Image: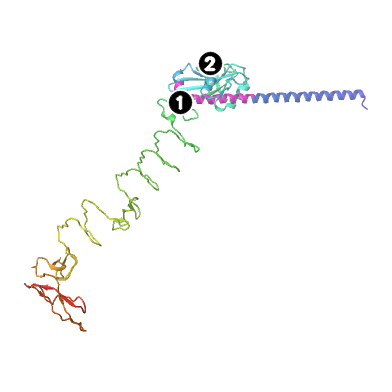
Amino acid sequence: MISKKQQYGFLSLDMAIGLIVLSIVITLTTMWQIKQMDAQEYRITADHQRTIAEAQSKYLKDNFSAVLANATATVPVQITVPMLINTHHLPAGFSPTNTFGQTVIGLARKPNPNQLEVIVVTTGGQTIPEMGIRTIAEHLGGSGGFISSNNPDMVQGVRGGWQVSLSNYAIDPGPGHTASALFLMDGALANDYLYRNAVPNHPELNVMNTDLGMGGHDINNAGAITASGNVATSGDLSGNNVTAAATVSGSTANIAGETYTGGWFRSRGDTGWYSEKWGGGIYQSDPDWLRIYNNKSLTTDGALVGGQIFSIGNMTSSGRLSTSEFLSIGGIASEGARCSDNKLIAKTAAGAALSCENGFWKTAGSKDRWGGSFWTATHSGGCANPNPYTGSCSCPAGYQPSTQFAIQIGGCQPCISYMCFKPD
């Protein structure tokens, strides 16, 4: 049986063990909280430095030539946070110091012509523990670095990725500080950003290495645009002169002025040239004939030359009709027959030339043996059936009626007209 004294001893031992365990838990918790707070502070410090480093790189892009002109190999150009604020690369009120009170500045030196070597480094303030500066550098990524107590004259990159001697920048911040490397080779950052301003003797710094997506935004105030590939747009293309070394394709060409070509104007299909104002034109719808659209007339004050000229209607000339060859007349008429137009010419079936004179076809160049006019004989008698009518006719002196060319005007009429002729 355990005595009360022994029980008290056991209780005191349990309490002591409990207090020890509680103390250890509290200590570990406190250390974990401190570590978490430090980690958060290191992350905030890294974000602050990264923001300044990005602003420094933009500033250097915009002012590369000016910085290059003032930097030397041993005397760097210093770029401060107030300068970045004044040039609108950082917002107003941005702190130049981190959570440890260290001031962040940029230093740009010119080791070679057209080359800048730039670091962003912290100075002054509290000394950050070794583990802290390494953690901050890790958060900064590949450009992050730190100044270690093991080698206080050098900036070391994350896990030995790079190192730079601080003597090159004429600065000695001491251990416990961090840095970022912004190495500019010939005006281009290591991440190969497109440079906005021209760099002397380095046009490649203003050249894109990939497609440029505008996200639906405009390109304004451009000068000449030169392309080696296609230019495609779903909208209108406006400008002054358009020059193409090959084919210009489109559904419709609407030209307000004149159109010139050193080659052919070619139409495809059964189309050609068309006058929108007057409704006429020239086209070809078969392999043989060039046609006038809408049957418009064709006129010229010059000569009309062709191998053959055909007319399916009348052919009229207001001037003389000339030929250096024979004139072929297809109109056949009979000598002495009636004709309607004294301007007509014809030929007999045998090929003799005829001309229309006073309403009758006459042999060209013959004597004037057809004369006078129709002489009308009247008869007062009735009309027998069947007729012929047997009246008497008389002609002018020297003429006699022609029974050969007698023409009866009616089947039964009060007169018969005869053609009178004068014998040779």
- Three-letter amino acid code at the position of disc 2: Ile
Q: Judging from the image, what secondary structure is the residue with disc 2 in?
A: loop
The reply to whether the C-beta atoms of the residues labelled 1 and 2 are less than 8 Å apart is no
- Residue 52: x %, y % from top left: 55, 24
Please tell me whether residue 226 belongs to the stretch shown in magenta: no
- Residue 231: x %, y % from top left: 42, 41
Point 53% across, 15% down: residue: 171
Which of the 4 image quadrants contains residue 205?
top left
- Residue 26: x %, y % from top left: 75, 24
Frontmost residue, 334 versus 412: 412
Q: Which residue is mark 2?
A: 171
- Three-letter amino acid code at the position of disc 1: Gly
Q: Mark 2, residues whose alpha carbon is within 10 Å: few (<14), some, or many (≥20)?
A: some
Q: Which residues are magenta?
A: 41-66
Report the magenta stretch's main SS: helix
Q: Which residue is mark 1?
A: 187
